[in-house]
Structures are given as structure tokens and as C-alpha cells.
Image (spheres, grey):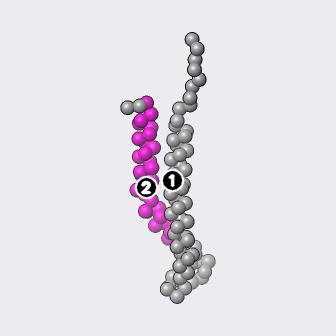
């Protein structure tokens, strides 16, 4: 095993934990999106008042944003924990 394998395992565990929590986070954020959309439109969600392109766009943007934020956080953690290269020392 290498020196940083514990840190790499920890980061992988955090990414896995984020993907496990993803459905719950998506449900909460979609509820928030639908609530705000209903307040802006001033209507309820009936088949007659539902605008499907806006609905699908909101779902796609919400899910894509969560996944990108999770991957950016993992990249920043990995970059911050990567040891710096040392120059060659002459003795």
C-alpha cells in the first residue's frame, strides 16, 4: 500500500456517501424548485397548467448541478491533499 492510500480511501468514501445521499438531496431541491415555480406562476400543478419543457429543464439542471458540485468538491479535496513534488537534493 502506498503512503496516501488512507487519504484516497477517505475521499472515495466521501464521494460514495455523496452519491448515496444524492436521491434525498434531489427530492428536497426538486420540491423547492416546484414550490418556487408554483409561487411564480400563481397556479397549482394540474395537467392543464403544467409546462413540461420547464419542468424537465428544472429537473435536469438541478441534478446536473448537484453532481458537478459533488465532483468539484472531491477534486478540491484531492488537490489539497496531494503532496507537493520535491526538488532533487544534492548532498
The answer to whether any part of residue 19 appears in the image is yes
Dot 1, how many residues are within 10 Å of its Cα: few (below 14), some (14-19), or many (20+)?
some
| Circle 2: element type | helix
Is 58 situated above or below 70? Answer: below
Q: CA distance from mark 1 to mark 2?
A: 8 Å
Quickly name the residue at label 2: 19
Quadrant, the C terminus: top right
Compare marks 1 and 2 and give the one earlier in the sequence. 2
Q: What are the residue bounds of the magenta stretch?
A: 3-32
- Furthest toward the top, the residue is 91
Residue that sits furthest to the bottom in the current view: 48
Tell me the SS state at disc 1. Answer: helix
With 62 as the anchor, is 24 left or right in this view?
Answer: left
Give percent across and percent down for residue 1. 38, 32
Most foreground residue, 44 or 54: 54
- Front residue (pair 89, 3): 89
- Residue in view at x 43 percent, y 45 percent: 12
Is the residue under label 2 in contact with that under label 1 (CB below 8 Å)? yes
Q: Does 86 lie within the magenta span?
A: no
Q: In terms of depth relative to the viewer, which is nearer, 65 or 87?
A: 87
User: Which residue is rendered at x = 60% and y = 82% of the image?
Assistant: 42
Q: Is residue 33 visible?
A: no
Residue occupying the point 49% across, 86% down: 47
In this figure, what is the number of numbered marks?
2
Looking at the image, residue 29 lies above or below residue 85: below
Percent position of residue 50, x then y: 53, 82
Q: Is residue 19 left or right of residue 33?
A: left
Q: Is residue 31 above or below residue 5?
A: below
- Looking at the picture, how far across and down is residue 55, in whole percent? 53, 75
**Residue behind mark 1:** 70
**Residue 25 drawn in magenta:** yes
Question: Is most of the magenta stretch helix, strand or loop?
Answer: helix
Amino acid at each position: 500500500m502506498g503512503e496516501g492510500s488512507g487519504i484516497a480511501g477517505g475521499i472515495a468514501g466521501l464521494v460514495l456517501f455523496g452519491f448515496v445521499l444524492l436521491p434525498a438531496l434531489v427530492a428536497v431541491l426538486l420540491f423547492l424548485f416546484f414550490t418556487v415555480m408554483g409561487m411564480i406562476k400563481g397556479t397549482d400543478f394540474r395537467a392543464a397548467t403544467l409546462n413540461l419543457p420547464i419542468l424537465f429543464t428544472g429537473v435536469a439542471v438541478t441534478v446536473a448541478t448537484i453532481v458537478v458540485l459533488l465532483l468539484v468538491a472531491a477534486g478540491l479535496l484531492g488537490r489539497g491533499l496531494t503532496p507537493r513534488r520535491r526538488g532533487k537534493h544534492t548532498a
